[in-house]
Image (tube, rainbow, N blue to C red):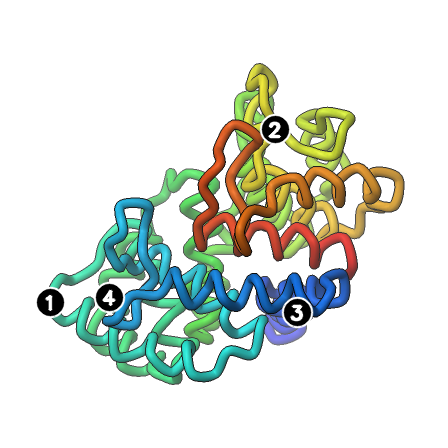
Amino acid sequence: MFSFRFFSWFKDLEIKSPEKILKFSMNLLERDITDDIRNFVRRSQSDQGGFRDRAGNPDLYYTLFGSFVADALDMKHESSLIWPYVRQETAMKEPDGVHLHCAAVLYSKYGQARAFRKSLGRKLRKASSVEEQPVYATFLSLISFYYLKDLRGMLRTGLKLKAPRDNGALPCPVAAASLVLGKNFGRPVDQDCKKIMSFYDGKGGFRATQTTPVSDLLSTAVALYALKFAGHDLREIKPDALAFIDSLFIDGGFSGHPLDPDPDIEYTFYGLLALGSLDY
């Protein structure tokens, strides 16, 4: 019974993993747009191989997004520069918090999952074992264990998963993480889908909270991804969503929302994730 349940969870993530969805975005992009995005990716990568944050400094968090985008665009040279940066960065400063999860995924993507488990695996397991772990942190733990192929870690994450006590208070990205977790581990998700649709602005975008005046690309991307992961029909909102995503495409990258004129590699990841979720 354990084997059957676990591998059914694993199959869902394998089929609908972020890198698979990112690849689908290529079906919606014209060749010249794809070339513009490649040039933007190159400009966003530092000489050290890591991707720059908004202050212009290489950072593990932004490097994770950059690695996914570079892979989706088949940018082999740029991808080859990332692991040396990750290795040096984690050797100089042991990551924690979200950077620990980023390191877990990056180590795994570059064939170093065993090295991560040996050096940082205990720290990750300790971080994920907090009984009252917030929904989004649980989601990060699940993704980290998935990439590390840590079956025991994934099972522990699934067994302690509980529906949020106050779903009405969750912002859109956290509600999206809750939906993916719930669907992945067999929890009924109809109410979760309705909750996420309540963030929809009726014009193609999703707001971070019920009271946020402007929709943003992060909330839109994770909402679309989670809804698609759960099997929700997106055809009715697809035309407006495509228009909203297109409005945030600037100089080869994507910006965060209509009031933000500066694209970066994180939002470029979310732009492609949103497009891929609509094509998948």
Can you identify the residue that label 1 sits on?
92
Q: Residue at x 66, y 48 (%)?
A: 226
In space, the residues marked 3 and 1 are separated at their CA atoms by 33 Å
Q: Amino acid at mark 2?
A: Ser
Q: Amino acid at mark 4?
A: Arg
Q: Amino acid at mark 3?
A: Lys
Question: Residue 265 at x, y = what percent?
Answer: 45, 55
Can you identify the residue that label 3 sits on?
23
In space, the residues marked 4 and 3 are separated at their CA atoms by 33 Å
Q: Secondary structure at mark 3?
A: helix
Viewer-side label of 3, 1: 3
Question: Residue 127 at x, y = what percent?
Answer: 29, 52
In space, the residues marked 2 and 1 are separated at their CA atoms by 38 Å
Q: Residue at x 23, y 68 (%)?
A: 120
Q: Secondary structure at mark 2?
A: loop
Residue 34 image-quadrant placement: bottom right
On residue 130, which mark appears? none
Q: Nearer the viewer, residue 181 or 55?
A: 55
222 in relation to 104, above or below: above
Q: Nearer the viewer, residue 97 or 212?
A: 212
Can you identify the residue that label 4 sits on?
122
Viewer-side label of 4, 3: 3
Residue 29 image-quadrant placement: bottom right
Can you identify the residue that label 2 sits on?
215
